[in-house]
C-alpha cells in the first residue's frame, strides 16, 4: 500500500509477486523501531528502522516513527515483509487516507495477473481460508488508519505551534524551522532547512471554469498584455527595434510628486502615443484605480503620498523606471510602492498557474482522451522578483515592508532572519548622532554588504532562507549574488593562489535567474560606491537560457518568449538613485530594454547653488572663501582620466608643491628663532580624489617625484584605523604638509579632516554634500579649487547649480579662459 506521513525513509509496496519499491521521503508512522513488530500475515519478519515521518510512497501504514526502510513484499523475509495476498482486496477493505495516493491501474493489474504459477494451482478451499484470514487484517488496517489520522492532526497542531513561537534563548531552536546557517558559504547559497514544505492550495473549479478573482481574465490588465498574452507580432517588431537601439522619446513633467522631468522612451515599432502621454500626466487616486488583487486591497497597501500616486501608473504598467530623485525622506514611500507591485505580480502569476493546473486536472479526470489546451503560464524556474540592496539592514526594511502589506499568519525562520540581518536588541547602534542624516540612514543597523536571501510565499505563510529554485523573491546585494553565481573563467585564471583557484573554480550556476520578470535596484548610488561592476555582472547573467537540466520544469507550459530568449526585453527593471551619473545612465541604456511598455527616466528639474553658497561661508572666518573651477580639454570619456592626470600634474600640482615647500622653510626658520612658536595648523593642502583609481595614480606620482615633495599622508577606505588616526594627527599638527583623501573613504567613514589651508578637488564629487562637508571640516580653509572637464557636467551641476553649469562646460571663463571663480 502507498502511504506515508512525515519523515524520511524508504518504503516499498509490492503487490502479489511483483516487487516494486519507492524511494524518497516516505515510510509510515506508528509502531516502534522495526516497522510493524512481528511478521506480516503471509510470513516474513519486519526488520529495519521503521518508516519515517514524511511524504512519499512507503510501506503500509504501521511502520515505525523514525528513519529507515519499510517495505511490503508478499511472502519471504526481508526489511518489512508484510502485506495481503491480493492488494485489491486490501484497498477495498481499508481505503487509503486523503493524504496518500491510491494504487495505479498498473499496480492493480499486476496484483491480479502477476501471481506465480504455483499459486494459480491452489485449490478453492485454500483461497477461502486465505480470505477468512484477510478479514481481520483488513479490520486491523482500518483501525490503524483511524489512529494515524488522529496522530497526524496532533502533529500538524504541534508544528503550527512550533512555527508561531520561536524558542527563546536558542538561536538555532529545537527543530528544523530555526536551523541556523552552518557557515558563510551556506549563507551565501541559502541552504534550505530540512522539513516539510507547506502544500500549495489548488483552487476549485466551478461550472464556469474557475472560482477565483475576477481580474484574472481582465484583458486590460497590464499583466495580461505584457506577460501572459502579449501580441506576438508586435513583440517581435519591438524586440528588433530595441536591439537596434531605435527608441522614440518624448519629455513630460509630472504635475505632482516632485519627481522632476520625465524622459519617456519606447521602441519605434511599439511606440504608443496614448501610453506615453499617460505615463507623463496620469496619476491615481487610490489602489482601486490599479489592477490590484483583491486580497491586497487593504488599508496596509493604500497609496497615501503624491509621489506614490504619481509613480504608480508607470510602475504598475510594467514600464522600466530609472528614478534619480530618491532621498532619505521619500525612501519609505518608494519601498512601499515597489513592494506592493512585487506582491501583486507574484499573486497574479501564482494564481494563474494554479488555475491552469486545476483546469488540466479536471480535464484529465472528466475526459482523459481529450487533447489538453496549450497553457503557457510559467518560466523556466520559480523566482520571479529580484531585489538588490546595498546592506543587510536595507534588505530587512524591504522584508518588513512586504510583511506589512501581506500580513501573513506565519513567518518561518523569522528569528533566524533577525539574527542574520539585524543587530541584537540590547545593542546600541554605533553610528554617532553627529554624522550626517544620509550616512546614518545608509549605515544604521547591520551594514554588511554580502548577503543573499530566498523568500517563498504561500497562501498564508512567508518562508525565509528557502532555496533559490523554490523561492518567489530573491533579495541580495550585488556582491552576494555574484558570489552565489560563481566566478568566471577569467577570474579563475587570474587567481595565482592555488587555494583561491580551488575556492573559486566552481561551476557557475545562474539558472535560477533565467525567469526573473521584475528586478528592483534600490539605493543605486550606494551600490555605485561599493562596486558597480558587480551589479553589471548580475544583469549580464540574468534572463539567460538555462544551461543545466531542469527536471521540475514543465516545458509544455513555459512561455514562448522565454523559450526564444526574449525575456530581457519583457523584464521590468526599476532603479532608484539619489542622483544621475554617467555609469547609471549607461546602465539604463544597456540593461533597461523593455520592448513592450518602454522606459522612463526622471531628471530633477533644476539644481540650485545652495551647496556652493554654504561651502563659501562654512569656516570660522567672516569672509567668504574663494572657490575656483579650472576646466581642461578632454576629447572623450575614455581619454578623460589620462587628460585629467596630465593637466593636474603639469598645471595645478607644481604650484601647490612650491608653496608647501616655502611654508615649511618659513616654519623651520621660525622654530629656530622661537622654539615655542605655534604649530602650522591650517597651512596644509587637502586633495580630495573621488575615484579610487585616480587616488592610487596620484599617490604613486607623489611617491616617485624628483625632488621628493613635502611629507604627505594618504587615507583611503582600506587604510587601517591606526594609520588614519596618525595621518589626521600629523596633518593637523603640520608634520604632513599634504594629505590625499579618497571619495570612498569619505563615503564609508565621513571623517572630519582638520588642518587644511587649501582644498583641492581632483574632480567634482558625485555626492553634492561631500563638497560642503570637506570644506567645512577644514575650519581654516582659505581657498578651494576644483578641476573639471565637460564630461563632469552632471556632478558639476549638483555643486554650482543648473544656471551656471552650461556656461562653465561650454563657455568662456571670467578671465577670458577656462577658469571660473565664485566669491
Image (tube, grey):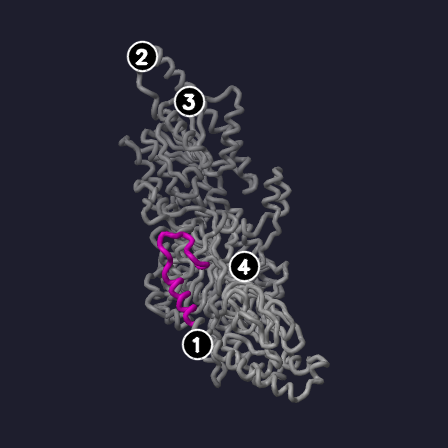
Task: Depth check: give the residue in front, 739 or 323.
Answer: 739
> From the viewer's perspective, is residue 442 above or below residue 716?
below
The answer to if 169 sits in the magenta stretch is yes
Label located before the other in sequence (4 or 3): 4
Residue 257 x %, y %: 35, 59
Question: Are there few (<14), some (14-19), or many (20+) residues within 10 Å of tag 4?
Answer: many
Residue holding disc 2 = 674
Judging from the image, what secondary structure is the residue with disc 2 in?
loop
Distance from disc 3 to disc 2, alpha carbons, whole Å, reads 21 Å
The N terminus lies in quadrant:
bottom right
**In this rendering, the label closer to the viewer, 2 or 1:** 1
Q: Are marks 4 and 2 in contact (CB under 8 Å)?
A: no
Q: Read off the magenta span.
A: 153-177
Say which quarter of the image contains residue 83: bottom right
> Label 2 near label 3: C-beta < 8 Å?
no
Mark number displayed over residue 213: 1
Q: Secondary structure at mark 3?
A: helix
> In screen coordinates, is 458 left or right of 757?
right
Taking the image as drawn, is residue 600 in sight?
Answer: no
User: Residue tagged by mark 3?
Assistant: 660
Q: Residue furthest right?
A: 117
Q: Nearer the viewer, mark 3 or mark 1?
A: 1
Quick one: quadrant of the C terminus? top left
Q: CA distance from mark 4 to mark 1?
A: 31 Å
- Residue 343, image x and y in percent? 43, 65
Amino acid at each position: 500500500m502507498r502511504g506515508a506521513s512525515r519523515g524520511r525513509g524508504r518504503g516499498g509496496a509490492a503487490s502479489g509477486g511483483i516487487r516494486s519499491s519507492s524511494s524518497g521521503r516516505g515510510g509510515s508512522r506508528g509502531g516502534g523501531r522495526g516497522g510493524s513488530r512481528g511478521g506480516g500475515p503471509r510470513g516474513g519478519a519486519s526488520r529495519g528502522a521503521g518508516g519515517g515521518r514524511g511524504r512519499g510512497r512507503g510501506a503500509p501504514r504501521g511502520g515505525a516513527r523514525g528513519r529507515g526502510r519499510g517495505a511490503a513484499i508478499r511472502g519471504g523475509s526481508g526489511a518489512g515483509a508484510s502485506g495481503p495476498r491480493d492488494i485489491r482486496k486490501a484497498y477495498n477493505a481499508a481505503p487509503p487516507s486523503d493524504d496518500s495516493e491510491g494504487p495505479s491501474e498498473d499496480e492493480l493489474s499486476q496484483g491480479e495477473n502477476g501471481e506465480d504459477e504455483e499459486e494459480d494451482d491452489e485449490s478453492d478451499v485454500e483461497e477461502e481460508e486465505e480470505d477468512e484470514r484477510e478479514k481481520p487484517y483488513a479490520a486491523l488496517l482500518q483501525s490503524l488508519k483511524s489512529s494515524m489520522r488522529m496522530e497526524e492532526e496532533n502533529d500538524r497542531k504541534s508544528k503550527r505551534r512550533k512555527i508561531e513561537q520561536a524558542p527563546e534563548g536558542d538561536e538555532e531552536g529545537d527543530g528544523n524551522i530555526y536551523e541556523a546557517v552552518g557557515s558563510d558559504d551556506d549563507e551565501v547559497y541559502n541552504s534550505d532547512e530540512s522539513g516539510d514544505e507547506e502544500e500549495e492550495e489548488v483552487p476549485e473549479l466551478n461550472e464556469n471554469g474557475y472560482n477565483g478573482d475576477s481580474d484574472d481574465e481582465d484583458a486590460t490588465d497590464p499583466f495580461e498584455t505584457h506577460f501572459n498574452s502579449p501580441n506576438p507580432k508586435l513583440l517581435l517588431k519591438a524586440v528588433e527595434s530595441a536591439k537596434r537601439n531605435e527608441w522614440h522619446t518624448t519629455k513630460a513633467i509630472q504635475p505632482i510628486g516632485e519627481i522632476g522631468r520625465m524622459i519617456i522612451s519606447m521602441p519605434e515599432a511599439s511606440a504608443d502615443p496614448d501610453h506615453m502621454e499617460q505615463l507623463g500626466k496620469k496619476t491615481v487616486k487610490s489602489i482601486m484605480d490599479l489592477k490590484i488583487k483583491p486580497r491586497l486591497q487593504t488599508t496596509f497597501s493604500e497609496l497615501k503620498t503624491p509621489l506614490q500616486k504619481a509613480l504608480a501608473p508607470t510602475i504598475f504598467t510594467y514600464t522600466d523606471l530609472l528614478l534619480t530623485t530618491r532621498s532619505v525622506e521619500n525612501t519609505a514611500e518608494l519601498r512601499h510602492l515597489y513592494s506592493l507591485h512585487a506582491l501583486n505580480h507574484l499573486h497574479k502569476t501564482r494564481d494563474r498557474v494554479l488555475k491552469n493546473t486545476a483546469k488540466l486536472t479536471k480535464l484529465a479526470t472528466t475526459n482523459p482522451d481529450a487533447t489538453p489546451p496549450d497553457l503557457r503560464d510559467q518560466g523556466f524556474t520559480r523566482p520571479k522578483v529580484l531585489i538588490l540592496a546595498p546592506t543587510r539592514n536595507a534588505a530587512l526594511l524591504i522584508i518588513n515592508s512586504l510583511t506589512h502589506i501581506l500580513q501573513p499568519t506565519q513567518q518561518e525562520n523569522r528569528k533566524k532572519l533577525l539574527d542574520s540581518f539585524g543587530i541584537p536588541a540590547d545593542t546600541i547602534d554605533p553610528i554617532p548622532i553627529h554624522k550626517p542624516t544620509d550616512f546614518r540612514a545608509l549605515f544604521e543597523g547591520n551594514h554588511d554588504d554580502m548577503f543573499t536571501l530566498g523568500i517563498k510565499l504561500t497562501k498564508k505563510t512567508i518562508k525565509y532562507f528557502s532555496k533559490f529554485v523554490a523561492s518567489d523573491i530573491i533579495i541580495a546585494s550585488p556582491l552576494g549574488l555574484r558570489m552565489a553565481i560563481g566566478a568566471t573563467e577569467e577570474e579563475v585564471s587570474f587567481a595565482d593562489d592555488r587555494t583561491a583557484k580551488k575556492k573559486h573554480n566552481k561551476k557557475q550556476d545562474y539558472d535560477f535567474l533565467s525567469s526573473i520578470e521584475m528586478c528592483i535596484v534600490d539605493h543605486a548610488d550606494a551600490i555605485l560606491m561599493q562596486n558597480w561592476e558587480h551589479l553589471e555582472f548580475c544583469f549580464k547573467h540574468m534572463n539567460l537560457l538555462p544551461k543545466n537540466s531542469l527536471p521540475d520544469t514543465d516545458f509544455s507550459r513555459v512561455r514562448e518568449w522565454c523559450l526564444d530568449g526574449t525575456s530581457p526585453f519583457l523584464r521590468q527593471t526599476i532603479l532608484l538613485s539619489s542622483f544621475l551619473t554617467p555609469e547609471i545612465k549607461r546602465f539604463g541604456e544597456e540593461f533597461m530594454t523593455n520592448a513592450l511598455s518602454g522606459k522612463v527616466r526622471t531628471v530633477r528639474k533644476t539644481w540650485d547653488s545652495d551647496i556652493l553658497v554654504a561651502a563659501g561661508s562654512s569656516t570660522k572666518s567672516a569672509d567668504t572663501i574663494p572657490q575656483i573651477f579650472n576646466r581642461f580639454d578632454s576629447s572623450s570619456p575614455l581619454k578623460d582620466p589620462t587628460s585629467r592626470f596630465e593637466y593636474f600634474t603639469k598645471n595645478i600640482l607644481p604650484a601647490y608643491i612650491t608653496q608647501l615647500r616655502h611654508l615649511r622653510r618659513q616654519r623651520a626658520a621660525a622654530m629656530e628663532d622661537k622654539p615655542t612658536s605655534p604649530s602650522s595648523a591650517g597651512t596644509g593642502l587637502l586633495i580630495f580624489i573621488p575615484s579610487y583609481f585616480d587616488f592610487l595614480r596620484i599617490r604613486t606620482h607623489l611617491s616617485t617625484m624628483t625632488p621628493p615633495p613635502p611629507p604627505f599622508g594618504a587615507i583611503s577606505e582600506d587604510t587601517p584605523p591606526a594609520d588614519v588616526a596618525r595621518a589626521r594627527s600629523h596633518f593637523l599638527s603640520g608634520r604632513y604638509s599634504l594629505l590625499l583623501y579618497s571619495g570612498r573613504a569619505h563615503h564609508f567613514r565621513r571623517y572630519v579632516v582638520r588642518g587644511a589651508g587649501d582644498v583641492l578637488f581632483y574632480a567634482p564629487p558625485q555626492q553634492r554634500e561631500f563638497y560642503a562637508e570637506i570644506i567645512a571640516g577644514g575650519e581654516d580653509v582659505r581657498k578651494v579649487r576644483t578641476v573639471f572637464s565637460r564630461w563632469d557636467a552632471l556632478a558639476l551641476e549638483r555643486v554650482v547649480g543648473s544656471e551656471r553649469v552650461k556656461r562653465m562646460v561650454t563657455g568662456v571663463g571670467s578671465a577670458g579662459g577656462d577658469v571660473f571663480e565664485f566669491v
